[in-house]
Amino acid sequence: MMRLLMILRVALKALNRNKMRTALTMLGMIIGVAAVIAMVALGKGAQSSIETQIKSAGTNVINVYAGNFMSGGVRMGSGASNTLTVDDANAIRNEVPGVQYLAIGVNTRGQAIAGNQNWSTRVNGTEVDWPSIRTWAMKYGNFFTQQDVTTASKLAVLGSTVATNLFGEDVDPTGQIMRIKNQPFKIIGVMASKGSSTGGEDQDDSVMIPYTTCQKKLMGIQHIQNITVSAEAANEVSTVSEAITTLLRTRHKIMPGDPDDFMVRTLEEMAAMRTEATRTMTALLAGIAGVSLLVGGIGIMNIMLVSVTERTREIGLRMAIGARGADVLTQFLVEAVVLSIFGGSIGIALGFGISWGVTEFLTWPTTISTDAVALAFGFSAMIGIFFGFYPATKAAKLDPIEALRFE
């Protein structure tokens, strides 16, 4: 034990003799470890943000959209078809097993006006199940009822962004009258804040009204644009979406081999694509940061080789008075590991600081992973041993007589 303590003391004194070189040698490890922690934190933060946005979009959600159609050989694009009907929605509700909630959707944009304030926003014509599908709570008032949908009542529920811009922060506007496209609507509620969607769109910047009202009073159409469905369980989403596709192809008399005139999409598909892209980017960033660690390790090896050359006479003198080759090997390995561990520790602190700065000043989400911290620190220690072993072995194998003669 005393021998090890003596070796450690000698190693620390050797590093302390040339503080500038020691600091510069550690710099590679500091940058590498900090980069690993910061890059992985950025990737994990992005992934966590995607998961939060997916959860905010609703529970077991399946979206059915109007598709495209051909006119004179010209593809009119998604949403151009008017073949999606209320009867289609009712058929899905009544004939597809596993459907828990369903809401018909008709959407437009309009200028919302209240008093001397106005705000351009999305107008979502929907049904009573919409809050249940989206797991969206009320802040003030209530959502409209099935009777309101049936009678095409002029009632509106505001998103928090619209409510704030028309009436001010934390003001309950229920009972107030607003106008959309010159049609008066009575405000019966305000939704709680929902935040951004998976596409970065402000979900709170919208007004919800009965879809029948949107059809008849604002748009003058009979068809519908989308149907939002919530499956009873997460493991039934795929089965329900396939059943919806089969039912609609039958109802729309689409022949085998012909393309659908509608689209069925699940949030899991979108989440999987975005999560996979984020995971790939995280791995790429971590790999780049890992290269920095390797460069730092090479720097340690180079400096240790220089140190062996500079201290050849010292090594020879120590071995001449009784030091064993194992003692010299241990001393140089300790020096390399100390450089790695000290550099890794400083790098961890710097990585935490960079992650905090990115979140604080750039408002990018970051999540520091304990696994990444442990991996970076452990890897830095292993690099010290790996890259320090060759210089240490070289020092241990020096011939004492030849070493004493070295100039």
Image (cartoon, rainbow, N blue to C red):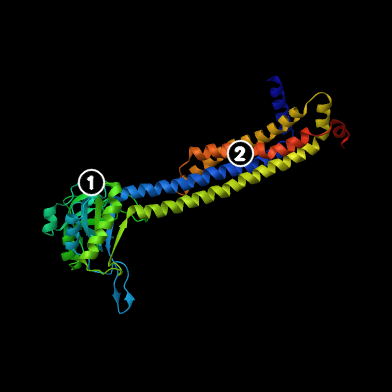
Q: Judge from the rendering whether residue 97 lies leftward or rightward of residue 11; answer left or right.
A: left
Residue 7 can be seen in this image? yes
Image quarter hosting the N terminus = top right
Residue at the top extreme?
A: 2
Query: Where is residue 247 drawn, in percent x and y?
Result: 22, 61
Q: Which residue is mark 2?
A: 380
User: Residue 59, can we see it?
Assistant: no
Q: Residue at x 23, y 48 (%)?
A: 132
Q: Quadrant of the C terminus?
A: top right
Residue 194 x %, y %: 30, 49
Camera-side residue of 167 and 275? 275
Which SS class for mark 1?
strand
Quick check: 193 left or right of 210? right
Q: Name which residue type carries label 2.
A: Ser
What's the distance in space between the residues labelled 1 and 2, CA to CA?
51 Å
Mark 2 surroundings: few (<14), some (14-19) or many (≥20) residues within 10 A: many
**Total numbered circles:** 2
**Image height of 234 relative to 331, above or below:** below
**Residue for point 54% across, 41% down:** 351
Residue at label 1? 138
Of the image marks 1 and 2, the number of the one nearer the N terminus = 1
Q: Position of residue 212 (x, y in %)?
A: 16, 61
Q: Residue at x 73, y 27 (%)?
A: 10
